Amino acid sequence: MAVAANTPIDLIESIYGQLPERMEIGRRRLGRGLTFAEKVLVNHLRDPETGGLERGRSYTDLDPDRVAMQDATAQMALLQFMTAGLPEVAVPSTVHCDHLIQAKVEGKQDLATAIDVNAEVYDFLESVSAKYGIGFWRPGSGIIHQVVLEQYAFPGGMMIGTDSHTPNAGGLGMVAIGVGGADAVDVMTGYPFNVRWPKLIGVKLTGTLSGWSAPKDVILKVAEILTVKGGTGAIVEYFGPGAESLSCTGKATICNMGAEIGATTSLFAYDEAMSRYLKSTGREAIASAADAVAGDLRADDEVYADPQQYFDEVIEIDLSELRPLINGPHTPDRARPVSELGAEAATEGWPMEISAALVGSCTNSSYEDISRAASIARFAADKGLELKTSLLVTPGSEQVRATIERDGLLADLEALGATVLANACGPCIGQWSRSDVEEGDANVIVNSYNRNFPKRNDGLASTLSFVTSPETVIALALAGRVDFDPVSDTLTARDGSEVRLEVPVGEELPAKGFTGGDSGFLAPPADRSGVDVKVSPESDRLQLLEPFEAWDGQDFVALPVLMKAKGKCTTDHISAAGPWLKYRGHLENISGNLFIGAVNAFTDEVGMGKDHLDGQTKSYPDIARHYHEAGQPWVAIGDENYGEGSSREHAAMEPRFRGARVVFTRSFARIHETNLKKQGVLPLTFADPATYDAVDQDDRISVLGLADLAPDTPVRCQIVKPDGTTVDFEANHTMNDEQIEWFRAGGALNIIRARQNS
């Protein structure tokens, strides 16, 4: 399959060509008009006449148009794909090298260091991409989601990506869903993407943004309203006159951070802003094709007339009344106006001084974002204002970086004292080497990123991270304190004068168009017969996979509880990033981080528990390794929204590798639950949430009647006390017949492999 650094127009036209027929089928089956999200989904049903359409219940087969992978997740996804035995990927796919570049000095030096340190991983990814017909974006090309928006996203399309912020492409009207690598392998091998038909949340936007308010404030407000799990199992569809007033990249910011509310994805309908963006990025033909079917790249009129009848929940936000917000620390849904942060910090005992300010990430690094930030920098320099803390800037892509350099925006930021980092994720994902603070030093950072869990940015639990818009980050960097309101407060210039910052002014798109810079794209060779995939058997960073064993047909009896997590347990807690990113292609080595961030519900210790084989207190990775070597299967227990955050399937593969059979929770985050299913781990939720409290440290758990495991049927379980007494309880699951077969086979990949070899 030929791969280019863009989406071929003939592919898009074929998708648009079936819209009228598919929309007629959808309206007939549902007996009503369709929302835009429903239109995209119906148009990508493998079987539009029989695919399940019951929200929150039906599992449905969909055919995405594209797969995108970033370098940290692509390693395991492609190691899995290699075991399937196919000569090439079945759908257009790309790999983007953006996660393994550590921010330490500045962009050029950090990139050179990364290319040297990660050489064997990059060689593997480049060679495996060439072997199987996958487009490869070299390190320095940009952050996956910004590159996808510039090159591949298109209105009405559907894609999956092995990163939780894949929904960024919803800013260009695409249903883009973050998944684990096993889901990507399904699609790359020609099988459908199987997902539960989502619920729908409608967000009606009215009014227009003004002053210091930015698109980032829209999603910060939505996160406040819905919380980190309020969007679970749902697509968030934005509409209304306010939606049309936002730029395409502003829409992308909002969709990107929908991952922080647990949403399956978020999207906006096609409009003039998207058309302008397509044309500015050299995709005039796509804009013309979209214009021809624009009526089906939006919801039907009756949906907009009475949204309450079409969405499971409707939220309305007046953009004219929205004020700058800042969310954090430790969770992206803890919101307040910027003007109130100082008072809250005083009450909570948080530091007032800001130790670092950071602009960029896949969420906020567009030309418009940088131009608004640069306008404040220019004004500050003219008025004699100076930074009061370090300022780090991450361009979203080489195209953005080259364009803002040409237009002088980079110079404006550097003149103020900003350090420009590589076109990569960097501090947003823990790839930040700091020397100014150490663990235990309570400090505050402000950033325009998306996720702010403890240790997320710099690996330090003592760092308090706050998320806001790029322009507000610059303002707070000039103040150096959190008790500053850029709307009303003043700053003292070098000459002693008091200066109030001007309202930021940005350009939606560059007047001179974009310049590509060094794109870094490598298309696979036409003749791939001589390409060898580079994996050294001695490598400590790459390890070929062995299939997981199939279920032996027996119940799970009296399994020890390796870990019971207290409170929030994200994929960062289960499988930490930062320095562990280097092992993302080596399942055994990366299992050394298993549960190291989890809080032990029995002792409140972090990353430590009781080894029930020898009674000693050890780190969770050491216990897991001991159980694995002894052939002792085990269970883990989580609380609410277990596994929220990143899509990293390592958080499911590591427990599976070390012998996990079941994970019990009060509730799961969507992607993580799916990842567990894919790897053959049984994800169960307590029918009575209070059962979580009934499990003590020395208890064991049995899961019974597994031979009769069936959809919509609770599972019989027992808590086995040390004295042999038992407490019966029920647990629920969300598996359909196909997913139960994954469990029985030992994982979905085993079924794919068997089909290819049959």
Image (cartoon, grey):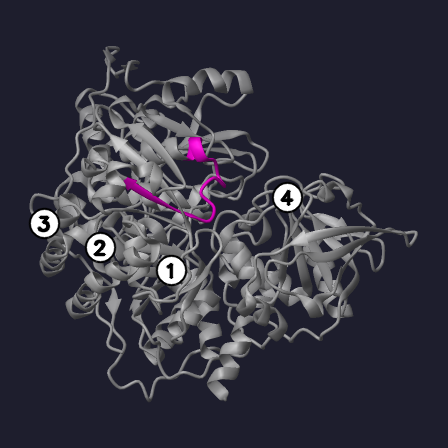
Distance of label 3 from label 1 (alpha carbons):
28 Å
**What's the CA distance linking mark 2 and mark 3?**
21 Å
Residue at left 16%, top 51%? 295
| Above or below for 419 versus 53 | above
**Magenta stretch contains residue 620:** no
**Tag in front: 1 or 2:** 2
**Residue 327 falls left or right of residue 469:** right
Mark 2 / mark 4, whichever is N-terminal: 2
Which quadrant holds residue 18? bottom left
Q: Disc 3 marks which residue?
A: 513
> Can residue 544 be spotted in the picture?
no
Q: Secondary structure at mark 3?
A: loop
Q: Amino acid at mark 2?
A: Pro
Q: Which amino acid, mark 1? A: Gly
Q: Earlier in the sequence, mark 3 or mark 1?
A: 1
Q: Which residue is mark 2?
A: 155
Tag of residue 639: 4
**Quarter of the rendering occupied by the N terminus:** bottom left
Amino acid at circle 4: Asp
Instruction: Kindly state the secondary structure of the residue where label 2 is placed.
Output: loop
Contact flag, marks 2 and 4 (Cβ < 8 Å): no
Mark 1, secondary structure of its residue? strand
